[in-house]
Image (spheres, rainbow, N blue to C red):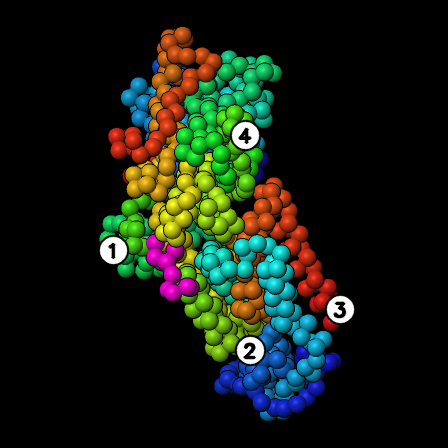
Amino acid sequence: MQVSSRGRATGTGFISWPAQAGRSPTGQHLGRVRIVRCANAKRSLTAGLFCAGGGICVVTDSDAKRVKCLTFENTLGQLFTANGALLLIFIGILILFSLTIPHFASWSNFANILQRNSIIGIVACGMLMMIILGGFDLSVGAVGAMSSVAAAALIVNVSTTLGVAGGLALGLIVGLFNGFCIAKIGINAFVATLATQVLVTGFVLVATSAQPVYGVPESFTVLGLGRVGPIPIPTIIFAAIALGVWAILKFTTFGHYIYIVGGNRKAARLAGINVDAVIIATYGVGGLLASAAGIILLGQTSIGQPASATDWPLTAIAAVVVGGVPLSGGVGTVGRAVLGTLLLGVLANALNLTGISPFWQPAVTGAVILAAVGADALRRTKS
Amino acid sequence: MKMISRRNVIALLAAAGALTISTSAFASQKKIGMVLYDTSIPFFSNVITAAKAVADKNDVNLDVQNGNRDLATQISIVQQFVTQQVDLILIAPGDPKGIIPAIRQANDANIPVMTINTKVDTSTGANVVTYIGVDDFVFGQKQGELLVKTVGDKANIAYIVGQLGTSAQLDREAGLMDTLKKHPGIKIVARSAADWDNSKALAATQDFLSRFPKGSLDAVVDQGPEGVNGAKQARQNGRDDVKFIMGDYPAEVRAAILDGTVVGTINQDPTPQGTTAMEDAIKWLNGEKSAFPQPFHYLDLPTVTRDNAQSMPPAWGG
């Protein structure tokens, strides 16, 4: 049961899914259980076997009739402790940089920032889902490079459509394989995805002899460098993907299962959730998004490069974590992943524009990551 | 349990004996061990392709190992070659000083060592037959000369460098600075590290163009070929006030030089490095010990511009 002491009961509106038979890990029947979510995500339930982020709880069927939704008092203080805090910091930084750094506050500069951070943002959206699930994926860089190389080879030799589809399919397969190793074989996420990363990199090097794949038509660079009006095309794709992930996490049963499995795998099993299927599917989506990012990278450079994207895994994890999503799983929203990505992107841009020495730039970035995550950790221990 | 392990030991000994016999039976075929800084980058995979072709033609056994961008790995591979008693070791090290103890071990075992692409520091007594490759310092100087020819004596320059601390980054920069010393009117107003990465070089170029509005920046010099996409974007956005000079000569740089997006580059071609290194090694093993330049066998480092790009095929890709 997870009830905030600062909460105040104000209503009973919640969404409930059909009851299903719950079993314990040893196969005993626990009676019927339901997964419920408050209609307003800011609320949490008064009773439940177990609750995860977003006010999603598992309750027994009999409890489901009497649970209530609680809501926090909406004070200025709360604005600083919830999602709003990061947004305020981000807007503050934007205003500060706009006032102090010449050439920062122009649309062409903002468009550049959006365009170049969209790729890592797409990777971060997938990473977010895997982090909510209580894991992460170190193979996203290798998958991105593989998809970009495979798509390039298929585009040159067969057709653009098949290239894009083939690249995406490969990413999905590697992602599902990651999920399979973690869920069915029981390998720890760190080890499983590290192994896949090395494996995939090896396959790509064997297939290409480390040579880039050339010959992708110039027109394909529209995907990476083009614009619709003032808005970069990669950013439109990023926005669509972020919206899609938001909708999955907020409205679908699959999304709610991710929170519950990430919050407490055992409780999820008790609630009758097919935990293994959720894990495999989530890593599948993660792999799919990494390969989408790889194809956009191909659109940016028009060369399928086997040795590219090596820094994606840690950058994407950093973006999600800077956004305030803990690695422990069970909580997190897509808005935080997007804000974390943009925050790191704006910072890198500002460092370039101010002409700070490249020797200092990694140190400044590291300090900002520590400060952001540290502030979040302090807030968590105090509340 | 004891029985089995003893039996295993005997089997191992027998296998080792058989191995010794079989190696001595093929003693006529020379074996060359080659360790390269990082075999997964296109530059070195071209060195390998060229070296293998020469090895096959001369019936030499060439064992290529990946240095993994890691000094400790490179040292342990050299030690492994010493243990295997190869006939000659070719090294492209990541660091000119750190590899020295390993080279000394090879010297002690009387195995000749040659270095490719990156020079080592022999001032502390390590013995190297010759160095095959180009001089990254000269590379930087030539980039500087091309820059002066392009922008004249007074200009503002932005500089994209490779991964900080790599010998190519340090030496190419030192060479460029050496040329620019004679032209104090050319100022480097911005500097960015792109780690030899396309996306990072594009970002660096975009930020240079935002920071220096039209008319305030004359040229962008990139130590590697990665800045080509930045150059293309600059041209699409009407920034033809900025000239671009790249380093290295892959297919995409050649195309950009031919269509005028890039002014020129310096061609450090990996293929002759692989070919020449193997040819020198084979000459040494055949006893023709003075048949090639020592201690430095410098290869050509041509400047490529629109004038000669048409007749010069790209160093890789294409």
The residue under label 1 is which amino acid type? Ser
Residue shown at the point (25%, 55%) measured from the top left: A159
Q: What element carries label 2?
A: loop
Can residue A284 be seen? no
Q: Between residues A310 and A177, which one lies in front from this camera angle?
A: A310
Marks 1 and 2 belong to one chain: yes
Q: Distance between the residues labelled 3 and 1?
A: 57 Å
Can you tell which of label 4 and label 1 is closer to the viewer?
4
The residue under label 4 is which amino acid type? Pro
Crowd around label 3: few <14 · some 14–19 · many ≥20 (10 Å): few
Residue shown at the point (53%, 86%) measured from the top left: A16
Task: Tell me whether circle 1 and circle 2 mark residues in contact (CB < 8 Å).
Answer: no
The residue under label 2 is which amino acid type? Ala
Furthest toward the left, the residue is A158
Residue shown at the point (61%, 80%) measured from the top left: A42
**Span colored in magenta:** A221-231
Marks 3 and 1 belong to one chain: yes
x and y percent of residue A199 in the render? 44, 47
Q: How far apart are marks 4 and 1 (CA)?
A: 53 Å
Q: Name the residue under label 2.
A: A271
Can residue A79 be seen? yes
Q: Mark 1 points at which residue?
A: A159
Q: Name the residue under label 4.
A: B184
Crowd around label 4: few <14 · some 14–19 · many ≥20 (10 Å): few
Q: Is mark 1 on a helix, strand or loop?
A: loop
Residue shown at the point (68%, 72%) measured from the top left: A80
Q: Between residues A113 and A5, which one lies in front from this camera angle?
A: A113
Marks 4 and 2 belong to one chain: no
Q: How far apart are marks 4 and 3 (CA)?
A: 58 Å
Q: Distance between the residues labelled 1 and 2?
A: 46 Å
Can you tell which of label 2 and label 3 is closer to the viewer?
3
Rendered image: mark on residue A382? 3
